[in-house]
Image (cartoon, grey):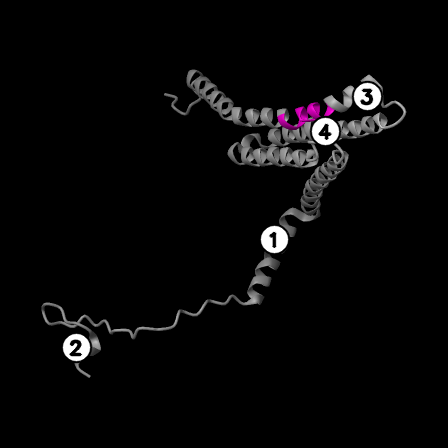
Amino acid sequence: MSEKSEWGQRSSTGVPLNIPRQPASSSAPEPIEIPRGHVLASLGKRVSNRRTFEGPRGASTRASVWLRYLGYFLTIMLCSGITQSCFAGVTGATSGGEWMLLSASFQLVIAAIGSFMFANRRVEIGHQMRSYVFGYTVLPGTGMAIFMWAARHLSSGPTGSDVFVNSLNSALPWLYFLPIIIPAVIFLKTVAGMRVLNRVQLDDQEIMKTYTRNDGRQR
């Protein structure tokens, strides 16, 4: 084998580049396998560090957070299921439970985005989220759906000619969508308005630091 084929091309001065040519590989590179024991050891070390620094109180706090949000999820699903069954016999409005689930999910997504964008107001956003989702949407909507179901069954009984009951059967499906749509729109506007509020408060703090000479530029 010649020197040129072994060491590749020479430079203009005749000195070899000393870069041997590698044979072309026809097969793809083999994937790197991570040992299972290494993964388990890493997880064990992470859990051990968490127990060391947080202790049992930290574990109980984390468990309570998971259980609380699991309770939120189950409450929303249960109320949506009850509402869907109450709307099953309403002509033209059989998807009441689906609308409730959609509204609650929309508000939860807005709360998650707001917590990511405004970390200093994360606790406030959480309180407002619970107020809007459960206080203004899920629980009032479920109560209205149960009341509408009872009024519909009353209209099918001996009091079917009652004007009040017939009016309730006509108006309640329309009134139901008020706690479904309006709180979602207001909550979106509230979270979106926090950006301007944060900017105004930050400007006020900077002005006070400047006029009181607490801005780090004291002479």
Q: Which amino acid is tagged 1?
A: Asn
Q: Which is in the foreground here, disc 3 or disc 2? A: 3
> What numbered label is drawn on residue 165?
3
Whether the residues at callouts 4 and 2 have beta carbons within 8 Å, the answer is no
> Magenta residues, as a range?
172-181
Residue positioned 77% across, 28% down in the render: 143
Q: Residues within 10 Å of mark 3 (few under 14, many from 20)?
A: many
Q: Earlier in the sequence, mark 4 or mark 2?
A: 2
Q: Quadrant of residue 89?
A: top right
Q: Earlier in the sequence, mark 3 or mark 4?
A: 4
Identify the element where label 3 is drawn. helix
- Cα separation, mark 1 vs mark 3, equals 64 Å
Which residue lies under the disc numbered 2?
A: 4
Q: Which amino acid is tagged 3?
A: Val
Q: Nearer the viewer, residue 150 or 107?
A: 150
- Cα separation, mark 2 vs mark 1, equals 58 Å
In the rendered image of this protein, does residue 70 appear above or below residue 42? above
Which residue lies under the disc numbered 1?
A: 49
In the rendered image of this protein, does residue 202 appear above or below residue 122? above
Q: Nearer the viewer, residue 140 or 65?
A: 140
Which residue lies under the disc numbered 4?
A: 141
Whether the residues at callouts 3 and 2 have beta carbons within 8 Å, the answer is no
Q: Residues within 10 Å of mark 4 (few under 14, many from 20)?
A: many
Can you say which quadrant of the picture contains the C terminus?
top left
